[in-house]
Image: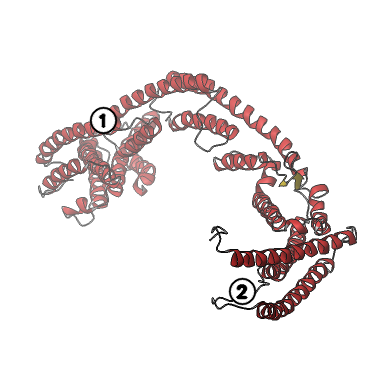
Amino acid sequence: QEIIETLPALMNAIKMIYTIARYYNSTDKMTKLFIKITNQMIKNCKHRVQPSRKVDDIWESDPEDLIEKLNMCVKLNEAYQRQYNETKEKVADLPKGRHFDFSVTAIFGKFDLFCRRVLKLIEIFQTILQFKALSKHNFEGVEAILKQFQTIIDAFKNKKYDLLDYNNTKFDRDFVQFNVQISQLDNDLQNFIEANFSKFRNIEYSLKLLRKFESILIRDSLKHSLQSKYNAVLNNYSAELSSIEKTFGELKANPPIVRNMPTQAGKIIWAKHLFQKITGPIQSLPATPINPSELRRYYGMYNSLGKQLTIYEVWYLRDWSNNIERAKAGLQSTLIVRHDASRKLVVNFDFDIFELVREAKCLERVGISIPEGARIILLQEEKFKAYYNELNYLLREYERIISKIKPICKNILGPHIEDLEFKLRPGLLTLTWTSMNIEAYIKHVYQGLSKLEQLIINVNDIIENRIENNLKAISKVDLVDLPSNSKPLSLDEFVEIQEKHIKERTQFLMSKNVEVERSVDDLLQTILLYPLDPHVDQVSSEETKRIKSYYIWYLYQALLNSTQNSLNRMKHRVCGKKGQSTTE
């Protein structure tokens, strides 16, 4: 490059020498001067390419750097001859100047021979660079070709002569043989490329593979074969465009949707997938190796189908966006409602909101921008799910606790149930899904449920363990003491035994009666001491009387049952065993 930059000054100096100097006033002497300059340029070029003048220097050099140096040698020759011709024209234009009538063959012949050798070396090392790049891409099945190429190069390296010696004709014979062998490798490489393209039907992948080979292949024969591959891929692309357009026309009313995909989002994503399928190849098309008129035809087909798909996608996306506001209106409903048929409390949540969240997630996952309203709901998804689950569990707990109330206590615990429903009332009347105090409401209701459950547990414990168990014990009391042995008794002895037994049983019954009475009082006291909201009516005195009357009657039934069982035992003892006739 430095020599090229100094050539204009050098030629101007030579012109001045030729015009003024007496020694160089002849053509022969000027030709010898130019030959010396040429020889020095060739020497500099050789030194640049092969600094140590060793045969292996060239083979050990990096192919890219070496090719760049060799190209600079060719450029130097071209610049040298160009400057010579320009100087020759300038001298010819002088009115009394001499003409540059020197032998061009003598001056530039050696440099031209040297450059022809350089061009052959460039071809060799470009081939080396091509196969080196091919080895880096790890194509499956290319190892045999690379191995064969390495064998050819190793054989060339073993020649052990100066590659820059343009007078050595043995190199030219070896170069011809090298080209023949590389041509055979080119055929194998073309077959390898053909096999790779036959394996893959995906157009976008085929174009990527073509671009990859295009960046690797340098030899003209291989580049020409790539052109035919481009034409084949484009024909496939045209057929695919027609197929996608036909599929879109047939299925756009009811497109195939991925399993568990929401309907609206599925349609939008289906259209977007088809659009991406036709966009990928068109973006990968190179402009250079394709006929412009053919390229315009493919772009026309792409634009026509792309417009249909875009309109379809935008229409459904706009329709889905309009549904967002309608779905958001469901957030203004109350948290809880009472079912019309069963009259049970249920969570009042619009499941279209969850559907909206699913669709928003699916659309955002494929890179579609969603409206701000949908994004706000999407950000609150976890909160809505948590509230829904909490309220659902709360109402199940409510039903479970209410179901634990014994029938006898249904009426007397009516105010307590009303007190709990009063705590639930904000969720029925005022609180919506956008309210800020839902968590406090849930916590407040849970506290009420916990208190009511504890009350019901205490009441049931008193009824089961203190009242009903005692009443059962009373009903099982035996009021007659029948001796087990068969020793005969007089009437007085029998009466004496019964009076003693009755006295003992009476004490037992009196104690049980006191226990039942106290238990009923404790039961009523537990119910009455439960704190109720001021807005809820207190337990009526009629209900407390009804509870007492019920257990008085229950105690009477227990005594009646005890008496009846005792008399039946006496009857069986006097009249004989059960099932035996009176004559026996």
- Residue at x-position 64% and y-position 75%: 481
Residue furthest front in the image? 583
Residue at left offset 56%, top offset 30%: 267
Crowd tier of the residue under label 1, counting other residues whose Cα lies within 10 Å: few below 14, some 14–19, many 20 or above: some
Neighbor class of circle 2 (other Cα within 10 Å; few <14, some 14-19, many 20+) is: some
- Viewer-proximal residue, 104 or 565? 565
Q: Which residue is mark 2?
A: 482
Q: Is residue 113 left or right of residue 333?
A: left
Q: Position of residue 3 (x, y in %)?
A: 34, 47
User: Label 1 sits on what residue type?
Assistant: Glu
> Which mark sits nearer the N-terminus, 2 or 1?
1
The x, y position of residue 219, in whole percent, is: 26, 34
In percent of width and height, residue 271 lies at: 54, 29
Q: Is residue 340 above or below residue 511?
A: above
Q: Secondary structure at mark 1?
A: helix
Compared to 567, does 129 lie above or below?
above
Report the Cα–Cα distance between label 2 and label 1: 114 Å
Name the residue tied to disc 1: 194
Where does the image place residue 525, in percent across and percent down from the top left? 83, 70
Of circles 2 and 1, the one toward us is 2
Picture quarter containing residue 322? top right
Q: Residue at x 57, y 23 (%)?
A: 307
Label 2's element? loop
Q: Is residue 97 visible?
A: no
**Eyeballing the image, is 331 above or below 281?**
below
Amino acid on which disc 2 is placed: Leu
